[in-house]
Image: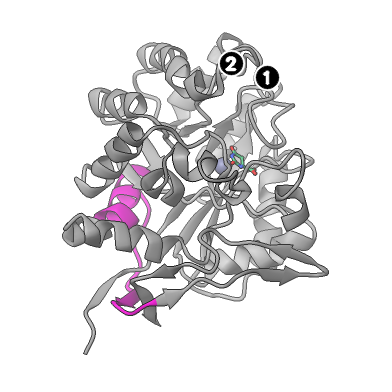
Amino acid sequence: MSELITIKLPNDMHVHFREGNLLDFAVNATAEHFHHAVAMPNLIDPVTTYKKALKYYEQIQTVSNHSHFKPLVTMYLTGDIKEIDISQGSSDSRIIGVKLYPAGVTTNSSNGVSNIQDCYKIFEWMEKYDLPLLVHGEVNNPETDIFDREKLFIDELMLITQNFPELRVIFEHISTKDAVDFVKDSADLVAATITPQHMVLNRNDLLSGGLKPHHYCLPVVKREIHRKAIAEAAFSGNRKFFLGTDSAPHYKNQKQSSCGCAGIFSASTALVIYLDAFDKAGALEKFEDFCVNNSSHFYKLAKTDKQITFKKEIFEVQSSYAVGDQEIIPFMANQKISWSIAKEL
Ligand code: DOR
Ligand code: ZN
């Protein structure tokens, strides 16, 4: 009998469901294994208002084939967002927060924020209504070295947390030891999501021995010292760190291109990748905290009685998924992982 581990159905606190042809595929890849999932608003036509967020929520619900699945949606921060969007969003359990993209830092972020200080009035409303701020934490100066963009953003973030001490802030997909330390040293209202790629890859895995486009995401994976600090933060069980896959599907031809898109599709494999890392670190007893308890606590989410069981048995990741006449390559395609999903619900 192989080793088993059962936990409550996890929450994915950061995921890209996209729109159009990808929506159904992306939603169900997540809905199958997760209870809650926080959908990012960086669509081609970004989700910039309360009304648009509700429309996106309905689209997600319509394609979901899983009744246990509870999507949560975010609004994309622009200088045009109104107090009424914030107040309505805060009293609607389908809306989880507002996402800050510094303009131009990543996929579909051209409508993002150029000067963060211009948003201080909005942060005041968010603090007043207790609506969390989710942050893509990289500076958008194209001249800044790409490996330094997160570290340099911490100064901006520090200003936000100092000026708005009651605002809940989530430093998304952290990629540096500096971000880990910042979050640890901040108040309890500051937390971070951790992706599977930032937990298991360093920049050699992206760049050494051949360029790996399916390991390319933003923020880009960094040196081993950073990977280690992120992984240890997750394994420690510290309540401020929780699961957010940043699963971000792009078609194969857009990834394997002379100018490849940033984003790693991990929805279907993330859980066993995280689990394998926790197991190898001897931290299995903290796995449920990372997957469910920490995010439920921070975001005040109801837990479910539904569970998922994993068994210690080799699982070979599928080489690709067909979506229409296109292909999506999953994270760790064709690789063997020591854990597999035994039973859901
Ligand atoms: O790698 C990434 N992909 N990082 C992001 O911030 C956005 C995401 C996407 O939407 O593809
Ligand atoms: Zn993302």
- Secondary structure of the residue carrying tag 1 is loop
Residue 223, position in %: x, y?
39, 32
Q: Neighbour class for label 1 at 10 Å: few (<14), some, many (≥20)?
A: some
Which segment did they paint magenta? Answer: 289-314
- Residue 262, label in figure: none
Residue pictured at 21% horizontal, 42% vertical: 238
Is 182 on the left-hand or right-hand side of 257?
Answer: left
Q: Position of residue 33 (x, y in %)?
A: 46, 70
Please tell me whether mark 2 sits on a helix, a strand or a loop: helix
Horizontal and vertical percent for residue 82?
66, 25
In depth, the one of 2 and 74 nearer the eye is: 2
Query: In the image as oriented, which residue stretches furthest toward the right?
Result: 325
Q: Quadrant of the C terminus?
A: bottom left
How dense is the environment of label 2, judged by Cα within 10 Å: few (below 14), some, or many (20 and up)?
some
Mark 1 or mark 2: name the one nearer the start of the chain: 1
- In the image, is residue 274 above or below residue 110? below
User: Which amino acid, mark 1?
Assistant: Gly
Query: Relative to residue 310, is residue 211 drawn left or right?
Result: right
**Is the CB of the residue bearing disc 2 within 8 angstroms of ligand 1?**
no
Q: Which residue is mark 2?
A: 119
- According to the image, label 1 marks what residue? 79
Q: Is residue 327 at all visible to an observer of this figure?
A: yes
Asked whether the beta carbons under mark 1 and mark 2 sit within 8 Å of each other, the answer is: yes
**C-alpha separation, residue under disc 1 versus residue under disc 2:** 6 Å
Quarter of the image with the N terminus in it: bottom left
Q: Is residue 298 magenta?
A: yes
